[in-house]
Image (cartoon, grey):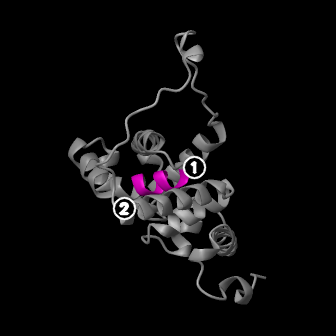
């Protein structure tokens, strides 16, 4: 199928897109932590992959090659992301102060609130990871890639993958100690 796609066959390209878009999106989202950025990364990554398909060496599978492009593009987005501050369009808005809304009595249940709080805590912890650790963790967390495939995707040695994953997990457990299995922080040997 990749040969047909490289030759410009639109049906083959569509099939590759359909087959790999979910894994690409999950990877991009785990690295960028923003749905809008992840969608942009996926779109850009597929365009780049299809433009360079003739250069694809086929030493690794298409999925591994594509996810390498996705991970690198997502890391580029992180490097260039700037904090966006909301600026009121109307200068009079600043003088009004915050507007109070009526309380919402149809809010989520206690269990849903706990789930939302946990998701928020996990997002914040993942955002605090260094980009190289976040990329390895994101590729690993999809559950679809082996250490070897992650190493190939990021073009780093397997030992580096293992080390970054170890440090990412340890840092997450330190930031979220209530979620760490008992004794994991004390009994986890450091990689050599």
Q: In which quarter of the image is the C terminus?
A: bottom right
In the picture, measured across the screen, residue 102 lies left or right of residue 166, that is left
Q: Which residue is drawn at 64% across and 36% down?
A: 80
Q: What label does residue 112 carry, if any?
A: 2
Closer to us: 119 or 136:
119
Q: Which residue is drawn at 52% across and 13% down?
A: 89
Q: Residue at x 67, y 88 (%)?
A: 183
Looking at this view, name the residue that lies furthest to the right.
Answer: 192
Q: In which quarter of the image is the N terminus?
A: bottom left
Residue 162 in which image quadrant: bottom right
Magenta span dominant secondary structure: helix
Q: Residue at x 62, y 69 (%)?
A: 176
Closer to us: 2 or 142:
142
Residue 129 in which image quadrant: bottom right
**Residue matched to label 1:** 72
Vertical arrangement, residue 31 with respect to residue 98, above or below: below
Q: Is mark 1 on a helix, strand or loop?
A: helix
> Magenta stretch: residue 82 in it?
no
Q: How crowded is mark 2: few (under 14 residues within 10 Å), some or many (20 or more)?
A: few
Give how far across and how far down residue 39 sits, in percent.
41, 42
Give how far across and how far down residue 71 sits, in percent.
54, 53
User: Mark 2 or mark 1, which has the lower sequence index?
Assistant: 1
What residue span does the magenta drawing correspond to? 25-31
Closer to us: 160 or 13:
160
């Amino acid at each position: 199928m990749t040969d047909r796609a490289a030759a410009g066959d639109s049906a083959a390209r569509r099939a590759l897109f359909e087959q790999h878009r979910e894994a690409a999106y999950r990877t991009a989202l785990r690295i960028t932590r923003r749905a809008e950025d992840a969608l942009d990364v996926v779109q850009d990554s597929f365009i780049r992959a299809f433009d360079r398909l003739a250069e694809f060496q086929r030493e690794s599978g298409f999925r591994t090659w594509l996810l390498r492009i996705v991970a690198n593009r997502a890391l580029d987005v992180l490097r260039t992301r700037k904090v966006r501050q909301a600026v009121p369009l109307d200068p009079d808005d600043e003088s009004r102060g915050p507007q109070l809304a009526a309380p919402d009595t149809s809010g989520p249940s206690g269990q849903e609130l706990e789930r939302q709080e946990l998701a928020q805590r996990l997002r914040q912890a993942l955002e605090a990871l260094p980009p190289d650790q976040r990329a390895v963790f994101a590729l690993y967390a999809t559950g679809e890639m082996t250490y070897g495939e992650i190493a190939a995707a990021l073009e780093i040695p397997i030992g580096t993958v293992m080390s970054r994953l170890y440090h990412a997990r340890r840092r997450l457990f330190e930031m979220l100690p209530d979620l760490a299995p008992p004794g994991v922080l004390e009994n986890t040997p450091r990689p050599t």
